[in-house]
């Protein structure tokens, strides 16, 4: 655990030009504080001391504004930059040397059991406000754009943007898409149509019962 903490400090100094010293990182970086207390809480979680693990994680959330479930598995060198509002769920797995910006969520959809949260590869950047939701994998060296909503697997060495997110660069090459912005299906409208259809079916059944 302590070797990972030293690595965390050095990785922040390498990636953040505003970090002037290790002491500054240790004392003044809430992202480092959140990861430090996660590592302590995770040790208790692995040893089945679930209450103390959650107590530590909730105190860290209160102090930093960053919520990391102690059951998550996080590799070395995680840098949470300007981390207010970051949420990392219980079954999340994060590789080495990843960067997460403020407001990002590594969460679930509420539909899955067991493994509910994403698996993030090495050297992944998650932009501010991005949402990665579900038990799928995001490959190594991926960049998730700000405010993207990722609902499916993202291959390694790619960049994903949009809602829902789509890959726009893969292995350094731009991915071409049909840019028709008129005939894009509206998911909200589709769901409303489904609800309207179900309501009409129920109304017909109700009228049938009333006649009987």
Image: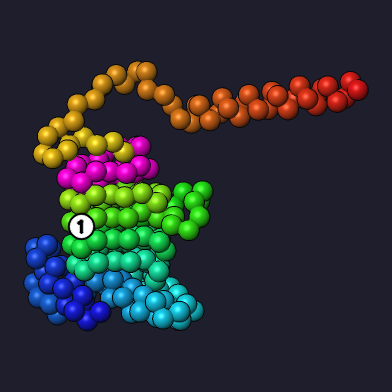
- Tell which of 126 and 50 is nearer to you: 50
Q: Which image quarter is the N terminus in?
A: bottom left
Mark 1 element type? loop
Q: Is 152 inside the magenta-drawn segment?
A: yes
Q: Which image quarter is the C terminus in?
A: top right
The residue positioned 35% from the left and 37% from the top of the image is: 164
The residue positioned 19% from the left and 67% from the top of the image is: 77
- Looking at the image, residue 172 lies above or below residue 40: above
> In this rendering, would 89 be left or right of 111?
left
Circle 1 residue: 122
Image spot of residue 138 (x, y percent): 28, 49
Magenta region, main secondary structure: loop
> In this rendering, would 199 be left or right of 108?
right
Q: Quarter-wise, where is residue 53 in the image? A: bottom left
Image spot of residue 115 (x, y percent): 43, 57
Count how many numbered circles sit on residues in the image. 1
Q: Quarter-wise, where is residue 157 in the image? A: top left
The residue positioned 29% from the left and 19% from the top of the image is: 180
The residue positioned 44% from the left and 55% from the top of the image is: 116
Colour mapping used in the image: rainbow
- Looking at the image, residue 85 lies above or below residue 3: above
Residue 105 appearing in the image:
no
Residue 173 appearing in the image:
yes
Image spot of residue 118 (x, y percent): 36, 53
Q: Quarter-wise, where is residue 15 in the image? A: bottom left
Q: Magenta span covers which residues?
A: 142-164
Judged from this view, the residue extending furthest toward the right is 212
Image spot of residue 76 (x, y percent): 21, 69
> In this rendering, would 129 be left or right of 211?
left
């Amino acid at each position: 655990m302590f070797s990972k903490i030293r690595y965390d400090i050095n990785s922040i100094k390498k990636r953040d030009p505003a970090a002037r010293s290790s002491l500054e990182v240790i004392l003044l970086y809430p992202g480092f504080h959140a990861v430090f207390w996660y590592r302590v809480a995770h040790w208790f979680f692995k040893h089945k001391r679930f209450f103390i693990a959650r107590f530590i994680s909730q105190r860290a959330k209160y102090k930093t504004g960053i919520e990391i479930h102690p059951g998550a598995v996080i590799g070395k060198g995680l840098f949470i930059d300007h981390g207010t509002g970051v949420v990392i769920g219980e079954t999340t797995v994060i590789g080495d040397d990843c960067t997460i910006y403020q407001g990002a969520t590594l969460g679930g959809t509420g539909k899955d059991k067991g493994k509910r949260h994403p698996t993030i590869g090495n050297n992944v950047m998650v932009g501010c406000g991005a949402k990665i939701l579900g038990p799928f994998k995001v490959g190594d060296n991926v960049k998730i754009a700000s405010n993207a909503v990722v609902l499916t697997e993202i291959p390694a060495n790619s960049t994903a943007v949009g809602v829902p997110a789509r890959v726009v660069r893969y292995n350094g090459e731009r991915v071409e898409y049909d840019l028709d912005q008129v005939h894009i299906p509206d998911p909200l409208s589709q769901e409303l149509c489904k609800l309207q259809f179900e309501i009409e079916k129920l109304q017909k059944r109700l009228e049938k019962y009333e006649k009987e």
